[in-house]
Image (spheres, grey):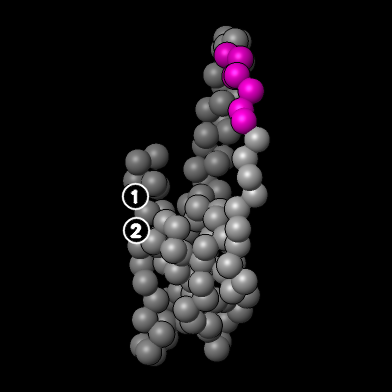
């Protein structure tokens, strides 16, 4: 599991070099590999949760009510960051060969690739 998490983190840190030949294909393959790794982590954790639930029931602690949060103010040109979920990502590039855009989030400070 740790290797999968390290792979996902490494792919998240990768910054596309739009000026390089073949970068669009590399970015697409990196995004595909990241999606497959995240899916595998979810499947493994889901299997683990099912096995744990079958082995012994665990009482769930009660949570105190959370105060209502004010809706965040979004910038007009910002989009939702696929990593942190905040609306603080800016489009920094587009692929000519593939339907992807390159984003940089002002919230988590990480670059990412998203479907256009």
Question: Pointer 2: residues within 10 angstroms few (<14), some, or many (20+)?
Answer: few
- Give me the residue at 52% from left, 76% from top: 91
Residue 15 x/y as whole percent: 37, 72
- Give me the residue at 60% from left, 19% from top: 64
Residue 104 x/y as whole percent: 45, 69
Secondary-structure class at tag 1: helix
Measure the C-alpha gap from mark 2 to mark 1.
Answer: 6 Å
- Does 112 sit left or right of 76 as displayed? left
Q: Is residue 85 above or below residue 43?
A: below
| Of residues 11 and 101, the one drawn nearer to the viewer in this rendering | 101
> Which range of residues does the magenta coloring cover?
60-67
Give the label on residue 116, or none: none
The residue labelled by disc 1 is: 6
The residue labelled by disc 2 is: 10
Residue 40 x/y as whole percent: 52, 46
Decide if residue 11 is in sight here: no
- Does 28 sit left or right of 23 as displayed? right
Decide if residue 40 is in sight here: yes
Residue 14 within the segment the image draws in magenta: no
What quarter of the picture does the N terminus occupy?
top left
Question: Pointer 1: residues within 10 angstroms few (<14), some, or many (20+)?
Answer: few
Residue 42 x/y as whole percent: 55, 41
Residue 66 placement: quadrant: top right
Total marks in image? 2
What quarter of the picture does the C terminus occupy?
bottom right
Residue 63 within the segment the image draws in magenta: yes
Secondary-structure class at tag 2: helix
């Amino acid at each position: 599991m740790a290797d999968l998490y390290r792979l996902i983190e490494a792919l998240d840190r990768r910054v596309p070099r739009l000026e390089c030949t073949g970068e669009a294909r590399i970015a697409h393959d990196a995004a595909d590999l990241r999606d497959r790794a995240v899916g595998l982590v979810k499947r493994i954790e889901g299997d683990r949760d099912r096995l744990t639930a079958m082995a012994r029931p665990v009482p769930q602690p009660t949570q105190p009510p959370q105060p209502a949060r004010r809706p965040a103010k979004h910038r007009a040109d910002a989009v939702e960051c696929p990593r942190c979920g905040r609306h603080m990502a800016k489009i920094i590039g587009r692929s000519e060969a593939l339907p992807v855009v390159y984003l940089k989030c002002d919230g988590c400070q990480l670059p990412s690739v998203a479907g256009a």
